[in-house]
């Protein structure tokens, strides 16, 4: 290795590593004082470097860069230090260490050396592979690379602080960051061609084990496990000339190990905090032309794993887990805090042209995990077994996009990505005080900009087949039976895919886009708390939100042409069925659930100023938040009550077409299932203020589709809609032999504002076609019975309005045509025979039961024009309900040309081959 390179790396590592950490690593020649305790800090960085098979094109001919294979590490650095450097540091630290040891002994604390088994371990492995790159700088360059690099540096950590104070604590940072720069072609003045094959594998870490049992502030683990492969491969960049890259690259990083400690019989002991990060960073397969032509063909893989459940890491119930600790019995011990993060972040296979031609064709696969299951105990303890959990799964990609200023650009991309952060969490806090409380915020999402085409003057096309699975957190279980203030649980799951794909925009050229999207986003899972014979225990608060926010299959043209073909198959799931019990308890087993399913989508629309535009788009979306709430407050006080405020909505704009002057056509099919909350099941028999249920399901629907606006143009818009919404569900409770128990108050609110199948034309021809099948169930049937003061009461108060604006042609010196078919079933609250109905105007309730209306005099349910009734059981099986509806095969991902019979055909001229 060149001397200046070696010295530069050594200097950087010294200043950034040793001086910061104060490790005091000794050279081989130093004099070690036998009275000095063992160094508790172990830090090091390993940087193996491979530079090979690269070529630079110069005016005098190509030059092969000299190969470099060199290992740079902290060992190299310490051997270069003056022999007495670490002696001086050690000599200065020895008196301080000695004084601290004497003070500890005078205090009567047991010691096993002043460091007391505490450890700080920082280990970084950063292999660098630069291979098979071609750079043309005034001459032609050609590189052919076959590159491989492997590094394994296991680093398990073990310590012990049992029976001691401030002992056996471990702060660990194990990070693997492989850097791969391979198969790139860069042309400044000349031609650059690269052909390469590269793979790189990096491993570090290991199990981290300590013990704080019978200790004080001992056995704590704080760990950062990073697996972050960085990949820059197979890119082609043309500044002035031609650049061609053709290659494959595979990179993987693992920061391994489980976390295990113990805080039993301790005080402030056995705490475990983990931050595993598995996030590849990729810049691969892109083609960029400033002035010149660039082309890339790329096949890449980037995988990461941060943290892993070891074979011996078994929790108190025999389950394998990544993180295991114990606070049984103890005080303020066995606490868990974790923030797993999973990626990747990638910019792949994009084609961009300034003045010239660019093409990019690639595939990318990436599998990533961070952390896993976490488990602790707080039984018989005070303030122990607490869990704070915030896993994040957020794969982010910009891929398969084509953009040209003055030129031609085409991108074709396929990707498969999985991202998993965290897992289930378990805690047990029976017979304890303020223990086993769990709080989890597990956001899961995906950010994608994929398969879009945009052009100024020229042609541009983007093609993307995208398959993404993203999951954060999971089942959350805790318990507070026989406890005080224990086993309470709060969760905020959020499933939010945010993306744009299959968009085409043209200024004075032709833009095209083709995108196929398959996406599954899952945040959190079932929250489960259990409490019998407790006080202020096992209560659940759950606020899940599923928000598919997507823009796809849209086109726009100023004075050009824009065409797209897009399909969407997306599932977003947040939370699960909340469960608890509060029998024979006080202030326990209550559930508050506020789930929201809010699809917000704009797709399959086309608009032109003076140009032509067309879209063929199909969408199948399933959005679910929360679920069936089940608890029990029998023979309890202020227990087993449920408050549920679900919101299942639809906010969509699709199948619209408009043109000032030109030809436009939109053919769009939509299948939507939006579900929030579910049934409520509780009991308050023999209780006081127990087993009551209050629910206020809200269902606003705003959908616009099949509308057309034509100026001096011919335009056709077709929107086929199949939407199924279910919000809340049946409510069941009882209040036998109780006081103020088993009561139900249900206030379902429904609103619809949906313009569809309309057309406006001025000096042109416009056609709007809409086929609508809507089934909506808001709320369910309330059922209760009971005796005792103010028990077993049942009230229903439905409110709502529907304002559809449909089948309206408006022609101004032009032709406007509309074709609409409509099948709508809405149920807003389901009456039951024992129900007492609140008047719609909200006036006072009758004073006594003798004044109550009979079952035949119930408050009127919402019944707007054209609205029928659908029982909640009809949607209990979404799959079967879907299969019975027109266009139902969209759920499986297939996109029929006409989801509903009677669709006005769109002329093929609107959809030329892309």
Image (cartoon, grey):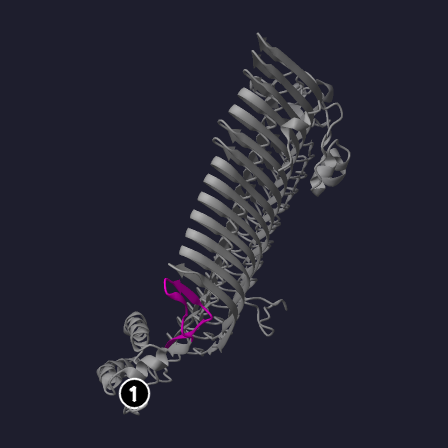
**Magenta stretch contains residue 46:** yes
Q: Where 128 sits versus 584, above or below?
A: below
Tag 1's secondary structure? Answer: loop
User: Along the line of sight, which residue is nearer the eye, 107 or 519?
Assistant: 519
**Residue 741 at what x, y percent from top left?**
61, 37
**Residue 486 at what x, y percent from top left?**
51, 56
Q: Where 790 sits versus 101, above or below?
A: above
The reply to whether residue 508 is in sight is yes
Give the number of callouts: 1
| Residue found 62% across the figure and 11% down from its top | 815
| Residue found 37% across the figure and 80% down from its top | 116
**Residue 865 at what x, y percent from top left?**
67, 16
User: Along the line of sight, which residue is nearer the eye, 518 or 643?
Assistant: 518
User: Along the line of sight, which residue is nearer the eye, 539 or 622?
Assistant: 622
Q: Which residue is mark 1?
A: 36
Chief secondary structure of the magenta portion = strand
Q: Where 464 sits versus 760, above or below?
A: below
**Residue 232 at what x, y percent from top left?**
46, 60
- Which segment did they paint magenta? 42-67
């Amino acid at each position: 290795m060149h001397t200046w390179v070696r010295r530069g790396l050594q200097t950087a590592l010294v200043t950034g590593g040793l001086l910061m950490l104060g490790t005091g690593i000794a050279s081989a020649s130093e004099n070690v004082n036998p009275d000095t305790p063992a160094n508790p800090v172990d830090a090091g960085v390993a940087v193996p470097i491979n530079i090979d098979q690269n070529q630079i094109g110069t005016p005098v001919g190509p030059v092969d860069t000299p190969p470099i294979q060199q290992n740079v590490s902290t060992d190299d650095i310490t051997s270069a230090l003056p022999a007495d450097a670490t002696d001086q540091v050690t000599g200065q630290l020895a008196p301080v260490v000695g004084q601290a040891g004497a003070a500890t002994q005078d205090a009567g604390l047991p010691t096993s050396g002043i460091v007391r088994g505490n450890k700080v371990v920082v280990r970084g492995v950063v292999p660098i592979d630069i291979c098979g790159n071609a750079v043309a700088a005034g001459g032609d360059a050609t590189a052919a690379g076959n590159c491989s690099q492997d590094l394994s540096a296991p680093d398990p950590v073990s310590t012990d602080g049992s029976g001691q104070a401030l002992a056996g604590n471990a702060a660990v940072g194990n990070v693997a960051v492989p850097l791969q720069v391979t198969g790139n072609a860069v042309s400044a003045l000349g031609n650059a061609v690269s052909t390469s094959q590269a793979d790189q594998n990096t491993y570090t870490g290991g199990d981290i084990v300590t013990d704080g049992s019978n200790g004080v502030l001992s056995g704590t683990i704080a760990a950062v496990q990073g697996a972050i492969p960085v990949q820059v491969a197979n890119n082609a960049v043309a500044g002035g000339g031609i650049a061609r890259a053709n290659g494959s690259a595979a990179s993987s990083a693992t920061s391994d190990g489980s976390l295990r400690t113990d805080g039993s019989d301790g005080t402030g002991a056995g705490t475990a905090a983990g931050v595993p990060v598995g996030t590849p960073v990729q810049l691969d397969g892109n083609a960029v032309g400033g002035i010149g032509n660039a082309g890339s063909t790329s096949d890449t893989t980037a995988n990461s794993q941060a943290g892993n459940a070891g074979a011996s890491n078994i929790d108190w119930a025999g389950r394998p887990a990544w993180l295991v600790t114990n606070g049984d019995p103890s005080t303020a011990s066995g606490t868990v805090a974790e923030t797993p993060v999973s990626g990747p972040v990638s910019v792949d296979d994009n084609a961009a042209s300034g003045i010239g031609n660019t093409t990019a064709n690639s595939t990318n696969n990436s599998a990533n995990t961070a952390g896993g299951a976490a488990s602790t105990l707080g039984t018989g303890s005070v303030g122990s077994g607490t869990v704070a959990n915030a896993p994040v799964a957020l794969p982010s990609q910009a891929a398969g996009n084509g953009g040209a200023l003055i030129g031609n650009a085409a991108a074709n991309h396929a990707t498969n990505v999985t991202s998993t952060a965290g897992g289930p969490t378990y805690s047990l806090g029976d017979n304890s005080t303020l223990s086993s409380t769990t709080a989890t915020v597990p956001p899961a999402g995906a950010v994608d900009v994929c398969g879009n085409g945009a052009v100024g003057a020229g042609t541009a096309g983007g093609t993307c087949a995208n398959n993404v699975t993203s999951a954060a957190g999971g089942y959350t279980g805790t318990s507070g039976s026989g406890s005080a203030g224990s086993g309470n649980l709060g969760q905020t799951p959020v499933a939010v895919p945010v993306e744009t794909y299959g968009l085409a925009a043209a200024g004075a050229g032709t833009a095209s886009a083709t995108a196929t999207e398959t996406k599954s986003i899952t945040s959190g899972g079932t929250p489960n708390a259990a409490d019998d014979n407790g006080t202020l225990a096992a209560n659940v608060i759950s606020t899940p939100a599923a928000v598919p926010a997507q823009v796809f299959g849209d086109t726009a043209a100023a004075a050009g042409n824009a065409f797209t073909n897009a399909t969407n198959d997306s599932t977003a799931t947040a939370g699960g069925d909340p469960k608890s019990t509060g029998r024979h308890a006080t202030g326990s087993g209550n559930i508050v659930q506020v789930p929201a399913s809010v699809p917000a989508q704009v797709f399959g629309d086309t608009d032109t100023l003076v140009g032509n535009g067309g879209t063929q788009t199909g969408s199948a979306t399933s959005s679910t938040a929360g679920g069936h709430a089940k608890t029990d407050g029998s023979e309890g006080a202020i227990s087993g009550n449920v408050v549920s405020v679900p919101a299942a909505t639809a906010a969509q704009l699709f199948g619209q077409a408009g043109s000032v002057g030109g030809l436009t056509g939109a053919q769009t099919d939509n299948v939507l299932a939006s579900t929030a909350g579910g049934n409520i099941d509780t009991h308050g028999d023999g209780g006081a203020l127990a087993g009551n249920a209050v629910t206020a399901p809200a269902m606003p629907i705003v959908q616009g589709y099949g509308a057309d606006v034509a100026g001096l143009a011919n335009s056709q818009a077709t929107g086929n809609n199949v939407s199924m919404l279910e919000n809340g569900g049946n409510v069941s409770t009882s209040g036998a032999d109780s006081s103020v128990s088993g009561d139900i108050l249900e206030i379902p609110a429904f609103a619809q504002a949906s313009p569809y199948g309309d057309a406006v034309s001025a000096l042109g021809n416009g056609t709007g076609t809409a086929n609508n099948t809507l089934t909506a169930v808001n709320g369910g049937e309330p059922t209760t019975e009971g005796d005792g003061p103010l028990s077993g009461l049942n009230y229903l108060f439905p409110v709502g309005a529907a304002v559809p604006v449909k089948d309206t042609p408006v022609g101004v010196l032009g032709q406007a045509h509309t074709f609409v078919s409509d099948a709508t079933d809405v149920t807003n609250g389901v009456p039951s025979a024992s129900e007492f109905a609140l008047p719609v105007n909200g006036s006072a309730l009758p004073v006594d039961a003798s004044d109550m209306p009979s079952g035949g005099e119930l408050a009127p349910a919402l019944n707007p024009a054209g609205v029928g009734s659908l029982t909640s059981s009809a949607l209990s099986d979404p799959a079967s309900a879907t299969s019975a509806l027109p266009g139902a095969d969209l759920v499986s991902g297939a996109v029929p040309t006409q989801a509903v019979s009677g669709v006005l055909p769109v002329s093929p001229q609107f959809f030329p081959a892309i």
